[in-house]
Image (cartoon, rainbow, N blue to C red):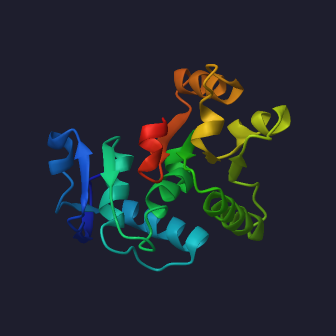
Amino acid sequence: LDAQGAQEGPIGWGSYLAEPRAKLQGYWGKRISAHKRAQLLQTLRKYFGHEAFRGSQEGVILNLLQGNHVFYQERTGLGKSLVYQLPALLETQSKGRITLVISPLRSLMQNQVMQLNAAARARREEDVAIFLDQSCGKGELASVERRRLVYCTPEKLFHKDGQNDLFKLLLKMNKAGKLLLIAIDEAQCVRKC
């Protein structure tokens, strides 16, 4: 991230871990540029209608944008989903890359996709998110590369028989540098993945 012209307030300490520690130390308590903070806040307002970040969201997002691996644990309702959604929605970060969200919570994913796409449509933009379940076909898979967020269940991503079409597509996108972030939303997914 651009550290020139840092004028805004410090990033708060958070209840998260990131790797590698040497990189992480650089952002805890460090000031960010006014331009970068304005981009973050503009995207926050544009898609979520919020004027400010809550808790350690901003610090977590900045660590993700730095390419750090982040484990973020927070109570229900405090905006965990926003920390992977916002980097995917930042114009300067996404650049044709997708964020893959793996979660067993179908209704939560469907609601998030509806809300994100409604916000995009309100500005006459193309849909930004898609939810892929067991019944999705080739047409939905073909639209994955046009989205910024791709939501799926662990079952959709992995089959006991081996790789499926979605997994193969994601491998191809990863090799081409088109995978921005993988978010596992809900700890029980780690065991399934």
- Looking at the picture, does residue 137 appear above or below residue 8? above
Q: Is residue 96 visible?
A: no
Q: Residue at x 50, y 78 (%)?
A: 50
Q: Position of residue 3 (x, y in %)?
A: 26, 53
Q: Is residue 73 visible?
A: yes
- Looking at the picture, does residue 60 appear above or below residue 97? below
Residue sitting nearer the eye, 143 or 3: 143
- Looking at the picture, does residue 17 appear above or below residue 43? above
Number of numbered tags placed on the structure image: 0
Residue sitting nearer the eye, 71 or 52: 71
Q: Residue at x 48, y 63 (%)?
A: 82
Q: Position of residue 184 (x, y in %)?
A: 46, 47
Q: Position of residue 136 (x, y in %)?
A: 79, 40
Q: Residue at x 46, y 80 (%)?
A: 51
- Furthest-front residue in this view: 160
Q: Residue at x 53, y 51 (%)?
A: 88
Q: Position of residue 39 (x, y in %)?
A: 46, 63
Residue sitting nearer the eye, 20 or 52: 20
Image quarter of residue 57: bottom left
Name the side, left or right, on which 65 lies relative to 10. Answer: right
Image quarter of residue 114: bottom right
Image quarter of residue 36: bottom left
